Amino acid sequence: MRVVIVAENASTNKGGEAFDPLHYFRVLRSRNIEAHLVVHSRSSAELQALYPEDCDRMHFVPDTWLHQLLWFCEQRLPRRAGEVTMGLLSHLYTQSIQRRLVRQLVRSHQIDVVHQPIPLSPKYPSLMFGVGAPVVIGPLNGGMEFPPAFRSRQNYFEELTIAVGRQISNFCNRLLPGKLRAETLLVANERTKQALPTGMRGTVIELVDNGVDLSVWRPVAPVAKEPNQSVHFVYVGRLVDWKAVDLLLEAFQPVAAQTNAILEIIGDGKLRQELEAVSQHLGLTDRVVFTGWLSQKECAHLLQQADGMVLPSLLECGGAVVLEAMAMGLPVIATNWGGPADYLDSTCGFLIDPTSSEAFVNGLTDAMLKLAQSPELRLSMGRAGLERVRQYFDWERKVDRILEIYKQTCGKKPTQRIGSCTG
């Protein structure tokens, strides 16, 4: 099997979807499968340091003046508006260069399958068509809105931009028909399947988008806490509005008043100073720690010392941190909306319904209190979460499935195919 993984970003430092293409490449190469990675050069130094023996299999799109201009403009718009305007233009420009690189690789290496795992949005058009080999796109995950009770967190300009973007997405996907012509499209859930552009002719397969590298996220044997020891909750993620860390701080105030728990905020973002001020205003300065950004290795080490994870995000299509915490044997409290609802069940954590701000905050508080006051519950939920991850979300098992999908895709007869499928 000869594979090209094509993505704008592949990195351990950028978080979110940038992990996915790197994991596919990493696991395929660990199995001695001929895999090539085509990404933007912004990650070149990191990737070459991580995989020095595979430098000849990594191919980089240069960072041009146009990339820099589009990025500059994107940073000055609201996040989601910037993503569907300047971000989309930058992504398509990168893909236009990648498409030429991929066609060259297909010809020179007799590539069997081209796989484009990101961007996750089902609406974004793709330029991966006519590359000379069958194309797999996804797993995609999107089609989300804020919960109805929290729509006010999205400003009018951002809401209008997204609505217009979605209306013209079908036209864009006909103009740039990578998704329409792909042999296989992978979707994480039914919600994303319904958001796909109309007119597709490929096979649609459901496959979870996130996974866990169990060589990094490993639990340690639980140690019984002394009665006076603090229960340690953690949040991991960017400090941005839709993550609802302000509501987490509000929910933690009564927990801090009734228990000896502490809350550690791991991550950074434009709201950090504002959230630190909220923590101070709520009288939580000595009970809430803002740690900042950590590498995967550092974060895994810290989670080994934690007792529970809380992710109050209101717009989380995936939520890899939920799976990583479960892999560490931690119970998880998360929002019953989007990705976390696909990962958690009542055996390994709490899903809090976002029906209103007050109800959501109270739900977070109640769940944290239950975990803080019951070591037995923390232990049983942690064990159940670890078993669930091993059974359904291990990256090794995920690549087993993706190889089956590659072979199934190779069995089709795409137009202008150059490579030949081999086992």
Image (cartoon, rainbow, N blue to C red):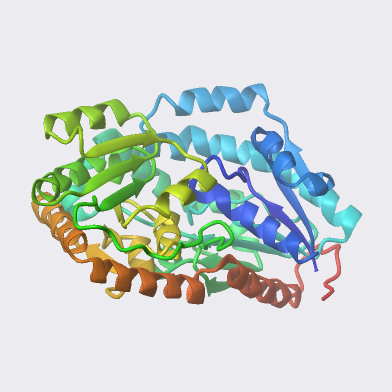
The residue nearer to you, when weighing 395 against 149, is 395
Question: Residue 146 appears at what percent x and percent y?
Answer: 27, 51
- The N terminus: image quadrant: bottom right
Picture residue at 35% right of the left edge, 29% below the top: 270
- Does 288 sit above or below residue 380? above
Q: Quadrant of residue 159?
A: top left
**395 to 46, vertically: above or below:** below
Residue 215 in the figure: left or right of residue 168: right
The structure residue drawn at horizontal position 51% and vertical position 36%, both measured from the top left corner, is 87
Residue 16, position as x, y percentages in the image = 48, 48
Q: Residue at x 42, y 48 (%)?
A: 302
- Residue 407 in the image: x percent, y percent? 73, 75
The residue nearer to you, when weighing 418 against 390, is 390
Asked whether residue 32 appears in the rendered view, the answer is yes
Point 82% across, 72% down: residue: 421
Residue 154 figure quarter:
top left
